[in-house]
Structure formats: structure tokens, C-alpha cells
Image (spheres, rainbow, N blue to C red):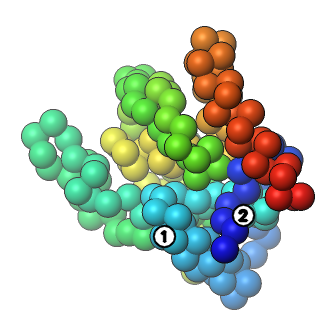
Amino acid sequence: MASPICVYGNPVLREKSEPVKEVTAEIRALADRMLGIMYSQEGIGLAAEQIGHTEAIFVLDVPVSADKNDQGLPNNPGVKMPQTFINPEIIGESEETAVAEEGCLSFPKLYVPVERPAEVVLRFLDRDGNTQVLNARGLLARAIQHELDHLDGVLLVDHMTPAMKLKNALRLRGIKKWYKSRGY
């Protein structure tokens, strides 16, 4: 079975998302579908653009075991997973940054070091249409920023230096070639 994930080369990945006007049963169904696809692809996050939609929505399920601080304690205690983020917007971020390798379901088997703020404050609508504010750090903060990039049409390749793009040129061409060979 072909992957339901849009990969590098698909123009929808460059589209900027459209705000969700109302959280409806259809939006919740989209979120549920996104979670199912994300789990089937063994990801921790997925934005609507990655499955061909342009609604401002992403889902995350960051394992607590992968998101601990230097003392081995959870970075985001009390944050329940999975989460659906509708019309998300960063309203604050730390001056402190962190660099870590990021992967992306739209760039199979490609990992890139990306520098991002270490902590963010996110305002969003939940599955019930209620406004929420979340303070996030560690892997959760990184995943939020990665998925928000997708909603803005920003891709992993945009975080690469020219040297990284050159080093990964064959892989990037291969992903685009695979996309085109599927007739998408």
C-alpha cells in the first residue's frame, strides 16, 4: 500500500494553511485520521499539509520517555498525549536555543540538525474548540515548531545550510523522483 504521506516535491507542502473557522465533527475526524496515519508511519507529529489538506491543524504524540531533561525528569509533566492543535500560534519563545537532529515523514530517512528556541508558549484551539495555552520545552517544543513550519509551508530542507543541501542532494532528488514516479 502506498504511503498516505505527501513527500518532498508535492506542492501542497509549500502551501500556507488556512485557519479553521469552526471546530466541527469533520475537523475532529480529520484529526483522528491524522493520528492514525501518524501512528502507522511511526511518527510523533503530523501536519494537515502532509496528507494533502490545508487546514491549520497538526497532531502530536510525543512519548514522555523521549522527552526528559538532563536529570531524567519529564520536560512537560501534566501534558497529556496525543494532542490536537487547531489554529496554533506561538505567542512566546525563549532566547535560549537548542540544536538537535530532526526527521520528517515527508523526507523519509533524512535527518538534519536544526536550531530552534528551547521553549515556546503556544496558543491553540483544542478538539472541543476551546482556546488553550501550552508552555512547552524539550522535544515537545521542537515538535510544535516543526509542525508549525509545515503549516507555514516551511520544510526541513529550508533549515539546511548550502553544504547540507549538497551533502543530501542525491537523497533529496531521490525523494522528488519517487514522488513524480507515483504520478502525484
- Asked if 179 appears above or below 34 in the picture, the reply is above
Q: Secondary structure at mark 2?
A: helix
- The percent coordinates of residue 176 (x first, y second) are 77, 41
The type of residue carrying mark 1 is Tyr
Q: CA distance from mark 2 to mark 1?
A: 13 Å
How many numbered marks does the figure carry?
Answer: 2
Residue corresponding to mark 2: 51
- The percent coordinates of residue 114 (x first, y second) are 49, 28
Specify whether 43 is left or right of 25.
left
Residue 61: assigned label: none
Residue farthest to the left, as pictured? 71
Q: Secondary structure at mark 1?
A: helix
Residue farthest to the bottom, as pictured? 25
Residue farthest to the right, as pictured? 183
For residue 85, what is the image quadrant?
bottom right
For residue 64, what is the image quadrant?
bottom left
The answer to whether residue 148 is seen in the rendering is no
**Which of the two residues, 39 or 184, is positioned nearer the viewer here?**
184
Residue corresponding to mark 1: 39
- The numbered mark, 2 or 1, whose residue comes first in the sequence reads 1
The answer to whether residue 26 is seen in the rendering is yes
**Which of the two residues, 22 or 82, is positioned nearer the viewer here?**
82
Which corner quadrant holds the N terminus?
bottom right
- 10 Å neighbourhood of mark 1: few (<14), some, or many (≥20)? some
Specify whether 36 is left or right of 77.
right
Residue occupying image coordinates x 58% and y 79%: 32
The type of residue carrying mark 2 is Ile
